Image (cartoon, rainbow, N blue to C red):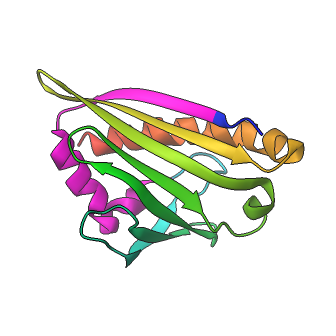
Amino acid sequence: MKPIIIRIQRHNNQTPQEICAAFLDTDRWPEFQGYSILPGIKSARFETRTSNMIGSRIRVHNTDESSHVEEIIEWDENRKLALRFQEFNSPLKNLASHFIEEWTFAPSQSGTEVIRSMSMYPKNVLGWVMLFPISRLMKKAFEKNASQLEK
């Protein structure tokens, strides 16, 4: 089934390397507060951390008591990072097979242009119908989080 894709673009005063270093600080992940009924992150911890970051797995516990795993599938501190969200709890595990989140970086005169996107892969038509409004909330949560990350 065709994924649902959201995307935001923001300017950040940090370098791509600083953004990636902040990303690896899982103590900061609770700064992602969600939006409306979309839960935020309560805690995040590495289950596996590889030397090149690819294949590293981060267990995320959300404010609604759900959890999932985010696995780093691409890691280039100059250009891009990508994560595969998986191992969802119900009811999400019945709606989506996985999500892919990507951060791409383009240096600018005063920092970095960051494009952050998420592709949600529904399992079926019901999943698509349920994930579509969730994707709109996720986009709002990304925008809110981007403002926090600029600080």
- Residue 131 position within the rendered picture, expressed as x and y whole percent measured from the top left: 74, 43
Quadrant of residue 73 in the image? Answer: bottom left
Residue closer to the observer: 32 or 52: 52
- Residue 113 position within the rendered picture, expressed as x and y whole percent measured from the top left: 27, 27
The residue sitting at 41% across, 59% down in the picture is 72
Which residue is outermost to the top? 109
The residue sitting at 49% across, 46% down in the picture is 101
> In the figure, is residue 103 to the left or right of 105?
right
- Residue 110 position within the rendered picture, expressed as x and y whole percent measured from the top left: 12, 25
Quadrant of residue 5 in the image? Answer: top right
Which residue is outermost to the bottom? 47
Residue numbers of the magenta segment: 5-33
Number of callouts: 0
> In the figure, is residue 119 to the left or right of 106?
right
8 vs 148: above or below = above
The residue sitting at 17% across, 47% down in the picture is 17
> In the figure, is residue 101 to the left or right of 18?
right
> In the figure, is residue 31 to the left or right of 107?
right
- Residue 144 position within the rendered picture, expressed as x and y whole percent measured from the top left: 44, 39
Which residue is outermost to the left? 109
Instruction: Let me know if residue 87 is in the magenta part.
Output: no
54 vs 20: above or below = below
81 vs 72: above or below = above
Indicate the quadrant containing the C terminus: top left, top right, bottom left or bottom right: top left
Indicate the quadrant containing the N terminus: top left, top right, bottom left or bottom right: top right
Residue closer to the observer: 37 or 138: 138
